Image (cartoon, rainbow, N blue to C red):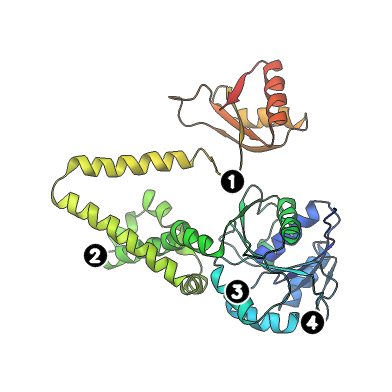
Amino acid sequence: MTLSVKKIGIIGLGLIGGSIARALKRSYKGYIIKAWDRDKNNLELGLKEEVLDEYALSLRKDFSDCDVIFLCVPVFVMRDILDELLMNISADCILTDVGSTKSDVVNLINDMKVKNPFIGGHPLAGSEKSGFTASRANLFENAYYCLTPVEGTDKDNLKRLRDIIIDLGAIPIEMTPDQHDRITAAISHVPHVIAASLVNLIDELDSPDNIMKTISAGGFKDLTRIASSSPSLWAGICLSNRDKILETIESFIEELKCFKIDLRNNNKESIEKFFTSARDIRNALSERKSIFQKTYSILVDVDDKPGIIALIASALANENINIKNIGILNSRETEDGALEIQVESEKSRLRSIDILRRLGYRAKQKD
């Protein structure tokens, strides 16, 4: 059975909504994009740049012909948006959102007794900039995009939405709304809280001449970069995922308590174990391995010199090989190669190895 989607509605043409429109247009899959935004200037700019095919000034009647609608608005305004939108859309139009918490949205959908199929979504991509002018077609490339179907979600509808996410250039992964909120609390929300706490701590401990803030460069600034995010946005996110964030903070406090005890007792062995474990886990993250996506990697033995990545990438691109990831390895202790390349399939990997070997490079498959 062919699962076709033709017309996409986007409610909220900011960074995420605008990037969805740009990415789908760039996919050249024939999508027709219609958008609504409170700022008409965004809509007119989207039309001028051919990111949109049309725009709507009314939520009550202008989205009746859409197959899928992306709700790219905050949860706290979603009820009012849906009150108008649901009046005239097709009964089988799929609704999805892009928010960073999912349980609140599912509760809202259930509370409003929405009859349309709804599948929650969350692209793990963003920018320190905001608004339509900051949107870009490659925002979602190789980024994970969480989909949160619930019991009873129609498999065909889920397939339709997955196909759209793939056309964005993203990697769709599925989980329950509760699992999503627990994960994002640990890997995103609490780290934001910790970063902000560290910055506020430095301000509290600093001397009148502000010497701490003056020399707080390098590692400290890298560690706390996310503290520069929008305060109103993150206040809303934290309140929306309050219970999962509180659970995670309690776990973090217990970790600090254990470290505090070891430090007080001069327990060097435990302290070293603490840092060794963190180092090994952190280093493993850089390998970009995932339980959700099989990777097809190649190791190439090359000199680490300016231009080598561009040279290799061009050689493969000329043979229509789609590179998913490429980079110089920082460690040669366990890997026989200086450059790692990830491609999209086993066929592409075998072709790439053959191409690179014919060009005189030592290339092999990475297990």
Query: x, y (%) of residue 103?
Result: 54, 70
Kind of residue indicated by mark 3: Pro
User: Quick one: 113 or 269, which is closer to the camera?
Assistant: 113
- Specify whether 156 is left or right of 105: right
Kind of residue indicated by mark 4: Ser
Report the Cα–Cα distance between label 1 and label 3: 28 Å
Task: Kindly identify the residue that appears in the image at 74 percent across and 32 percent down.
Answer: 321
Q: Check disc 1 and report the residue beneath it.
A: 292
The tally of labels here is: 4
Q: Do the residues under discs 1 and 4 have CB atoms within 8 angstroms?
A: no
Q: Residues within 10 Å of mark 2 (few under 14, many from 20)?
A: few
Chain-order first, disc 3 or disc 2:
3
Chain-order first, disc 1 or disc 4:
4
Disc number placed over residue 74 in the picture, else none: 3
Q: Secondary structure at mark 3?
A: loop
Kind of residue indicated by mark 2: Ser
Q: Secondary structure at mark 4?
A: loop
